[in-house]
Image (cartoon, rainbow, N blue to C red):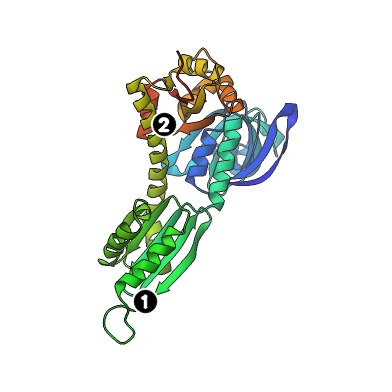
Amino acid sequence: MRISSRGHGEEGRERMTLVPENVDDLWHLSHVLESGDRVSGDTTRRIQRDDDQLRDTGGQREHLFVTVEVSDVEFARFANRLRVGGEIIDCSREDQLGHHHTLNVEEHDEVTIEKHFKPDQLERIEEAEQAAENADVAIATVEEGEAHIHTVAQYGTEERFSFTAPTGKGEYARPRSELFAELGQALARMDVDAIILAGPGFTKGDAQDYIAENHPDVADLITVVDTAAVGDRGVHEVLKRGAVDEVQTQTRISKEAELLDQLMEGIATGEKVAYGIEEVAEAAEFGAVEELLVVDDRLRQERQGEGDWEVDVNDVIRSVEQQGGDVTVFSGEFDPGRQLKNLGGIAALLRYRLQ
């Protein structure tokens, strides 16, 4: 996510102009936007003219800049777009005011949001911005005699290391283990969440075995992918197959799963946990919440006034944060989030056990 500008709107609202740079950013926005927010952007709209009505042509599309007051938000994952619908409250054509319109926001479209941002919503946007700058995945490609390491960020890839070590027979040949040692040492120095090890043939498997023996912590991060080439061409193959997206998704799921495991263990042993809105709200009131866990779609439902919790979830989140607790918003699309949903959609890991 790229934040182009920040400022203040009317009635105490904040204004933020954003450029979503990938599908994940669109997904994040779908959980930030709520009814009553104002969203502005370039769009096209079919305009019916008087002569068109006489001929019943359906009108012609025109490029407009509109601001809608949000009434509905839909993340169309398979279309790679975010649909934001609402009444037009400002427009480059005054005759369109008051009509309903849907903004189709796609990757790299600039939109301006004006709303009362909640702390976790701002944190979500800022984390998405940080993710665009920080590489969290490395792609290591290896074949006989050479190895390369690229880092992956949302703006593209960058080669960080390149090794050549002729192997096999001949005067200048070196043992394969030297190539694997250089590769393993370089990967061990990198601060990444996941590593994709790719290349043709069996060399990558041998490299994985060497790394597992000499750098077990690095080996735990590795996913192996077959490619026909190494270097830039190999990286292109990895990206084209969607392997990076899959690894990033699995990394996110694993973090959520770890927290859920702690919760389930606490439930099983009667230790320092709470689940369900009433228990969690009470724990937050006593300042006992160390980590608050809440499912994104349930959070949004409650904020939209469509849920059945008798406690204001925003008050719970605010209380937790003010007392130094952390808040993790789970994705309802993955298994940890679904399990949390079955526990009422909200839970907490506590600093101490409540009597």
Question: Nearer the N terminus, badge 1 or badge 2?
Answer: 1
Q: Quadrant of residue 162?
A: bottom left
Q: Tag on residue 286?
A: none
Left-right relation of 144 to 99 = left
Whether residue 308 is visible to the viewer of this picture, yes or no, is no
Q: Secondary structure at mark 1?
A: loop
Q: Quadrant of residue 142?
A: bottom left
The residue identified by callout 2 is: 332
The residue identified by callout 1 is: 165
Q: Determine the residue positioned at 41% across, 51% down.
A: 194
Percent coordinates x, y for residue 76 in the rendering: 45, 38
Percent coordinates x, y for residue 122 in the rendering: 60, 35
Left-right relation of 209 to 136 = left
Q: Determine the residue positioned at 49% across, 42% down.
A: 81
Q: Quadrant of residue 15?
A: top right
Q: CA distance from mark 1 to mark 2?
A: 47 Å
Q: Secondary structure at mark 2?
A: loop
Q: Quadrant of the C terminus?
A: top left
Task: State whether residue 300 is above or below residue 281.
Answer: below
Q: Determine the residue positioned at 57% across, 32% down.
A: 120
Percent coordinates x, y for residue 288 in the rendering: 52, 21
Task: State whether residue 153 is above or below residue 53.
Answer: below
Task: State whether residue 81 is above or below residue 172.
Answer: above
Q: Identify which amino acid the numbered label 2 is placed on.
A: Gly
Front residue of 158 and 181? 181
Dot 2 crowding, Cα within 10 Å, few <14, some 14–19, many 20+: some
Q: Identify which amino acid the numbered label 1 is placed on.
A: Ala
